[in-house]
């Protein structure tokens, strides 16, 4: 919500599934809509100042009363946890699948 948010909306090739991901348009694209993987490149959303560059694996889904579905990512290189709002064209089947799997895990 800060004034110094930099929004970088750009197309990229997903390093996990190889799909070409187009620009999002209404917000900054920060993960692949096909496999939901992201990349650890931001210290703050959109700044691209993180030097880790590890793959962020989607490990869970949270439901935020204001934002809706939020994807929880874990960096496979440094272990950092990142969260991103689900985009309009995200693979909802996969989101439900991750939500289901992660809720199974937290039940035990
Ligand atoms: Zn992908
Ligand atoms: Zn990382």
Image (cartoon, helix red, strand yellow):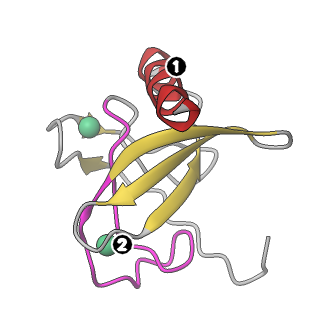
* Above or below for 87 versus 10: above
Q: Residue at x 28, y 74 (%)?
A: 78
Is disc 1's CB within 8 Å of ligand 1? Answer: no
Give the overall secondary structure of the magenta segment: loop
Q: How many marks?
A: 2
Q: Position of residue 65 (x, y in %)?
A: 85, 39
Residue 66 in magenta stretch: no
Quadrant in which residue 101 is drawn = top left
Could you tell me residue 102's position as x and y percent?
48, 33
Q: Is residue 30 visible?
A: no
* Residue 72 x, y percent position in the rendering: 51, 49
Between 40 and 48, the residue placed more toward the observer is: 40
The residue positioned farthest toward the right in the image shown: 66
Q: Residue at x 52, y 70 (%)?
A: 46
Q: Which mark is residue 41?
A: 2
Q: Is residue 1 above or below residue 82?
A: below
Quarter, ligand 2: bottom left
47 in the magenta segment: yes
User: SS at mark 2?
Assistant: loop
* Mark 1 residue crowding within 10 angstroms, few (<14) / some (14–19) / many (20+): some
Q: Earlier in the sequence, mark 1 or mark 2?
A: 2
52 or 77: which is nearer to us?
77
Q: Which residues are magenta?
A: 35-56
- Please say whether residue 98 is visible from this viewpoint: yes
Name the residue: 50% across, 78% down.
Answer: 47
Q: Does any atom of ligand 2 lie closer than 8 Å to the CB of label 2?
A: no
Which numbered tag is attached to residue 96? 1
Give the residue drawn at x 41%, y 77%: 48
List x then y, in percent, for residue 40. Answer: 35, 68
- Determine the secondary structure under disc 1: helix
What is the spatial separation of the Cα atoms under label 1 and label 2, in whole angstroms? 26 Å
């Amino acid at each position: 919500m800060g004034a110094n948010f930099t929004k970088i909306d750009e197309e990229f090739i997903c390093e996990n599934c190889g799909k070409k991901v187009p620009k999002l348009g209404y917000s900054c694209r920060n993960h692949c809509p096909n496999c939901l993987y992201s990349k650890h490149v931001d210290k703050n959303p959109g700044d691209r100042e993180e030097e880790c560059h590890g793959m962020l694996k989607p490990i869970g889904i949270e439901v935020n009363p204001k934002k809706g579905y939020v994807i929880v990512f874990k960096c496979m290189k440094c272990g950092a946890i990142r969260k991103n709002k689900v985009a309009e064209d995200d693979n909802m089947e996969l989101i439900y699948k991750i939500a289901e799997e992660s809720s199974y895990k937290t039940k035990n």
